[in-house]
Image (cartoon, grey):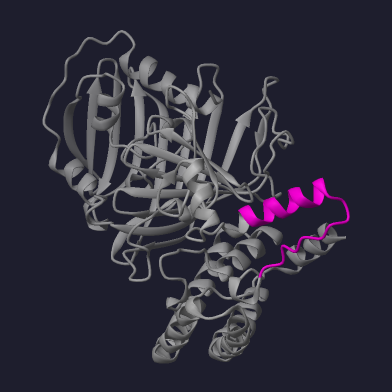
Amino acid sequence: MSARRWACVALWWTVLAGGGTALGGGERPPALTAAVEARAKELLRTARIEYAERSVVVEPDGRRVERPLHYYTWRCAGERYVSVDRGDEEGVVMRDADGRPRTDLPHQGPQGYLVKSDEVWLHSESSPAADVFGLQRADWFRLHDLRRLGLNPVTLGQDVEEACRANGLPAPDYEATTESGLDVVTATIGPGQFRWWIDPARGWSVVRAAVLRDGQETTSMWLTVAQVDGVWFPTEVEYVRHTDDGHELSTTYAMLSTEFNRPEHPQELTPADIGVEPGMTVHYQDRNDIVTAVWDGQAAISPDEYRVRLSNGSLKRGRTVERELAHLLREDAPGREASTKPSAESGGTATRPALFFAGERGKTFESQWEAYTRRFIMQYRLSAEQARKAWQICRDCEALGRSSIEKRRGDFDEWQKRKDALAGASAEEQKKQREALDLRRKELMAPVERIFEERLKPDLDRIPTAQQREARRETAK
């Protein structure tokens, strides 16, 4: 169990439950009810959030050490949400307890998690396999519904009453007052208390929260909020915990890009959104006996069914699986070449724009423009304010790209029909038609490519300071 997970559990049981016998059960005050309802999943059905985390830890010798800035992507659609750990500003996704990069893992790239109904899916970039756990592992992996940020000063993704039930604690007793135009709500459980400062003028946003024991704050959370897409939501959260030995541990979350209920957001999230492709091995870890299956793009099937469908052509492997097989072939047969270069249609190059048209329907890919922007932010180690500007440039360019494609929707639909018609053609005819289709696609996408080359890249290039550019040159040597 991680140190942070232990701290969370300890905080609940020692700060709130330790020695307490009060039964609670008071009615939730209207201000807190309004704060909870403002973050309801029915109201915030879809979201896309890019954020960064900065933590300060205390070493055994008492030194306070600031860990590198860590980047995440978070998305939701209804009850489901996806969290992708992008790694820190040094490009490291996982570190050990001493802060050293983990080198014992087979796949070092970003890690994606999908939380849905009663399962948590985990997939590491470039891995040909995925793991599936029970929902109880969500807290272990530090997975939270960010729509509820601020409703619980101990954990990020629950409100307090949910957390009380989950930890076997009684419902709290409430008290409500006002202070400098804010509604102040206090929930008492035994010797412990939660307290929220709620701003009715800013969408009933929680702007401060705290945990108290015997009248002393042990955990504090300050939230800076702003309105985006008609929703009041935090732009920055500072979380501070005071330890028994007098040390102060802090974590700051900076929201770099936030969107809600946009029409371009996917209305459903699936394993494909964390990179799970047809042909990947799926390990169900929390079943009595670990069950191994194969993903077919829609469901997990048995290895026997997979082999049959692969042989009759009704199922095709994804690019990651093909690449891994090619790698194994090269290892097993030295000198044998196996090309893994992505095709022009795959969108595999680093600078290729996302496919906004119907040619990729049924799939959801991260825009390559987003990937370019994220790399740019990390390479130049942009500040939070600079990163927000970079993401705004990216979103504006994406909107221009979508608009450009919508203007020629009929042409793109015709391209798709011609592509779909290739399925029944001979191999020779497919090759001939594919060359023409690739050329036509290039023509159709030319205006979008220009947005990338003439807007996104130069606008991003104007953000870094001279010092940041020099540091980038030194790093690249």
Of the pair 375 and 409, the residue shown nearer to us: 409
Q: Which residue: 67% across, 71% down?
A: 349
Q: Please provide percent x and percent y for residue 294.
A: 50, 44
Of the pair 369 and 163, the residue shown nearer to us: 369
Name the image quarter holding residue 164.
top left
Name the image quarter holding residue 269.
bottom left
Q: Is residue 172 left or right of residue 336?
A: left
Q: Which residue: 30% across, 48% down?
A: 79
Indicate whether 398 appears above or below 93: below
Furthest residue toward left: 27
Q: Which residue: 61% across, 47% down?
A: 128
Q: Please provide percent x and percent y for residue 263.
A: 33, 71
Asked if residue 331 lies in the magenta stretch, the reply is yes
Q: Which residue: 34% across, 57% down?
A: 268
| Residue 395 in view (yes/no) | yes
| Residue 253 in view (yes/no) | no
The magenta region covers: 321-342
Indicate whether 340 appears above or below 2: below
Q: Is residue 314 left or right of residue 447?
A: left
Q: Please provide percent x and percent y for residue 143.
A: 44, 39
Indicate whether 304 appears above or below 473: above
